[in-house]
Image (spheres, rainbow, N blue to C red):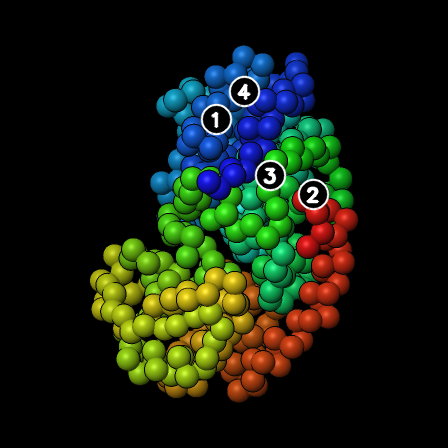
Amino acid sequence: MMKRVTLGLEVFLRERLDLVAGKRVALLACPSSIDSLLRSSWERLHAEPAVNLVALFGPEHGLRGAAQAGSPVQSARDSLTGLPVHSLYGKTHTPSPDMLLGIDMILIDLPDGGARFYTYLATALNVLRAAKNAGVEVVLLDRPAPLGGVRVEGPVLRSAWRSFVGPFELPIRYGMTIGELAQLVNAAEIGCDLTVVPMRGWQREMTYADTGLPFVPSSPNLPTLEAMLLYPGACLVEGTNLSEARGTTKPFEYIGAPWLHAEELADLLNELGLAGLRFRPVYFLPTFSKYQGELCAGVQVAILDRDAAQPITAMLHVLQAIKARYAEDFAWREAWQAAAPPPIDLLYGNDDLRLAIDSGRPVDELIAGWEADLYAFKALRTGHLLYGDA
């Protein structure tokens, strides 16, 4: 029988309630902020007499996870606890001074998506900054790194491309828990009063499937562990006029567009021999997002070997192959705001990918160029790892 990891939430409730003694506490959480018996962290904390829980904060998708990606979430009152829920994905992405009035400590119990552009990381870092400015303590209840804590992959973000989908100079896939990440960034530039409550029993080589914990999606479009593994690469599709299959049952597993030829594309991509992956022709009809109501042809990205798969490396080759074969139809999405960089640059972390594909430069040259930056990043993260060296 698989031994179950003990979450930071559970360690806190059993052993570290001293941290909140005499404090008025707020909680940042989402639908997958659960314990090993699927009880929400706000339910557990509200029922604990030693915790004076006075407010809740919700990230993208909201505390209950009902909102789609990019949809603003309104502040409200929680029906279970009666507490105010301050949205950090509406008019603001950062707690305002008014939101922090009457709060001595913020507990963060957020899962991480395992990729730099997953917005829960940026939200957590914004909370650290606001807490620093307000003199509020932060306690982060650690959770597993869903893709494991060993492998790093992709370009390290350059500072000129910082954004809400790139809040710090990290590679796309960084192999750290959200607690380790918070420690790293806090030490580098924030300096808030931060305590991380580690998990028990988590090891760096574990993916989420190895933890013995129930899986609850942290956002509507990452419904499976397969989608989460592909996400660090497949999310780059958001920066193009290809559909990443939002509005279907296979977001980030399907890629397509009305102008693609499914069988031809599957053959083309399978000829690339991308490690651990195989491509199957598919057709799908998105119910929302790109190409809503239009029949899309494309491929399913099937994982044959989780250990061998390199989702970011693979997606660079996929995008280059599609651009080369369908040059008249393929395009990069326009900037989200005037004077902002194109979305693909914000997601990738610089403009190298867009410029390389547009000029016909082999993406293998980009991939080879990651090595020095990844080596430096691994050295940087070493001092902040809580569960042994990678």
Q: In this view, does 351 lie above or below 361?
A: above
Q: Which amino acid does label 2 sit on?
A: Leu
Q: Which of marks 3 and 4 is in front?
A: 3
Q: Which of marks 2 and 4 is nearer the N terminus?
A: 4
In depth, the one of 87 and 121 nearer the eye is: 121
SS for dot 1 = helix
Q: Which residue is drawn at 39% across and 72% down?
A: 278
Q: Name the residue under label 4.
A: 53
**Nearer the N terminus, badge 3 or badge 2?**
3
Q: Along the polypeptide, which appears first: circle 3 or circle 4? A: 4
Q: Where is residue 382 in the image (x, y as percent from the top left)?
A: 75, 52
Q: Nearer the viewer, mark 3 or mark 2?
A: 3
Q: Mark 1 points at which residue?
A: 42
Residue 105: % across, % down: 64, 25
The outermost residue toward the front is: 1
Looking at the image, residue 222 lies above or below residue 64: below
Mark 3: secondary structure: loop
Amino acid type of the residue that numbered disc 4 sits on in the rendered structure: Leu
Q: Where is residue 288 in the image (x, y as percent from the top left)?
A: 29, 56
Do the numbered discs 3 and 4 sit on residues whose CB atoms are within 8 Å? Answer: no
Residue at the spot x=52%, y=67% of the render?
A: 308
Q: Are marks 3 and 2 in contact (CB under 8 Å)?
A: no
* Residue 266 numbered mark, or none: none
Residue on which disc 3 sits: 201
Q: Residue 386 carries which label?
A: 2
Q: Label 1 near label 4: C-beta < 8 Å?
A: yes
